[in-house]
Image: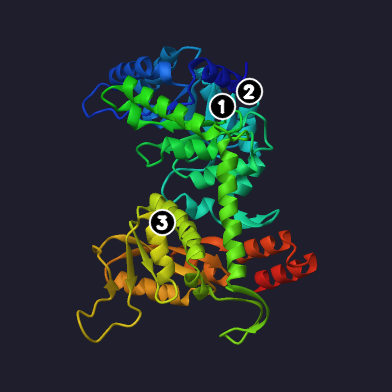
Amino acid sequence: MTFFQKLQKRIQDAHTLLCVGLDPRVPQGEDPFEFLTVKNRRVIEAAGPYTACFKPNIAFYEAHGIAGMRALEATLKMIGDDIPVIIDAKRNDIGATAEAYAKAVFDVLGADAVTLNPYMGKTSADPFLAYADKGYFLLCRTSNPGAGDIQELSVAGPHGSEPLFINLARQLSTWSDRIGLVVGGNDPQSLAAVRKELPDIWFLAPGIGAQGGTMEEAVFAGIRSDGMGILPMVGRAVYDAPDPAQAAREYRDALNAAREKALAGTGTGAAAAYSKHETELKDDICQGLIDTGCFQLGDFTLKSGKKSPFYIDMRKIQSDPRFLARVGKAYGALCSRVSRETGAAKIAGIPLAALPLATAASLSSGLPLVYPRMSVKSHGTGKLVEGEFTPGEAVILLDDLITTGLSKIEAAAILKEAGLEVADLVVLFERGVQGRKDMEQAGIRLHAYLHVEDLLGYLLAKKLISADTHKELIEYVRAD
């Protein structure tokens, strides 16, 4: 029986998708072996009836040397054969070293599955893949703050630009049919995006509970059409709970309620519905930019004097209340994700064009709004920044679009002068390539809801432009 067959049987028998992390912190002065084995036995016996699989993170055992590893071996024997075990090791190496890692996890510890880091390519996974009955979860879109610095880098995909983690997911799925992906349960947008790309793959979804993810959001975004395909992972919220049995049961019940709610009446699974919703919103934004005249094709001269085959003016959005609300929802989802990742608790809109959009984003996300004064008034308090804030707080800079980074960097400088931290910029529309380069040089991460290539792809799909015109426009954008 392979890992995923064993996992599916456990899920059906116990009626649960819950993965419980066994990640102990040994108090100072305690004997590691005794503490780990006693605490783990208590959690396993209490949470086991509600658990689809257990996931010990090997670092918490390695940190205590021989005593810790003996405790890990004892822990795995406590779990028994009916509940699968995933060793969270995130191993990554090649050749004999990778073979040794695989032997340690599977032959010595006897684990059913392991987490791996795919950064060194398939050859680093091959020694693990040689174990035909084991399972593998490879890092794809992780739950930690700052993961997007690398995992959301824009790369060329089959339909234009796409985030690196989507490109990676597609490649990893070809390595073996025994591979699953680690995708953060606190990032439903990314879960839905990967599920749309790979309808059948399994997800290990950390980040539920202590890291801010909710069971319903993760299940709704990541579940397959058969009601499986995702293992929401809860760690400290069960492991350190006064009553681990009650905590695990409540998470199991919440998960099952979310699963039933997600699948009720859809016929195709909630992930498809979630992905469809996200796609519909993006399509609606694209169509709205066309209908309101925010985006026009033609022969235009830009402020810089350069000729352009299209023109963008986001100021018209505010005159269409329905469209403004939809744009606010798009901004809100993006700002909420950045806030979860970075801890930034406020939006800072750049005057003047972006202020209506920043207000809509604030209403949608619930994040408070401030804004920098691009020219300080000579009367009154002479404030640099309007709105309530505390020096040292991190804010999300927000603008309508980006062509170059000049005005964004100026606004960030004012905010920083007032004592605020600025490390992220959110825009609705990314025009070309220069703006991203400018922001990278300024040390500010750019998050764009749409790239101009997305809109051009929409125009082509709706037959509003020809294939030849699409090709010409893409060539202009990439050369700009």
Q: Is residue 39 above or below residue 370?
A: above
Residue 295 falls left or right of residue 371: right
Q: Amino acid at mark 3?
A: Ser
Amino acid found under the numbered disc labelled 1 = Ala
Marked residue nearer the N-terminal end (3 or 1): 1
Looking at the figure, which quarter contains the C terminus?
bottom right
Residue identified by numbered label 2 = 131
Residue matched to label 3: 364
Q: Position of residue 325 (x, y in %)?
A: 47, 61
Circle 3 or circle 2, nearest the eye: 3
Q: Residue at x 48, y 38 (%)?
A: 218
Distance CA(mark 2)–CA(mark 1): 9 Å
Position of 143 with respect to 289 (left or right) is left
Residue 284, percent across and down? 58, 59
**Can residue 411 be seen at all in this image of the molecule?**
yes
Cα distance, mark 3 to mark 1? 47 Å
Camera-side mark, 2 or 1: 2
Marks 2 and 1 in Cβ contact (< 8 Å): yes
Q: Secondary structure at mark 1?
A: helix
**Left or right of 194 in this view: 231:** left
Measure the alpha-carbon separation of dots 3 and 2.
48 Å
Residue 56 — which label? none
For label 2, count other residues whose C-alpha is less than 10 Å away and answer few (under 14), some (14-19) or many (20+).
some
Q: Quadrant of the N terminus?
A: top right
* Classed neighbour count for the residue bearing mark 1: other residues with Cα under 10 Å, few (<14), some (14–19), many (≥20): many
| Residue 135 drawn above or below residue 165 | above
Question: Could you tell me the amino acid type at mark 2?
Answer: Tyr
Residue 102's tag is 1
SS type, badge 2:
loop
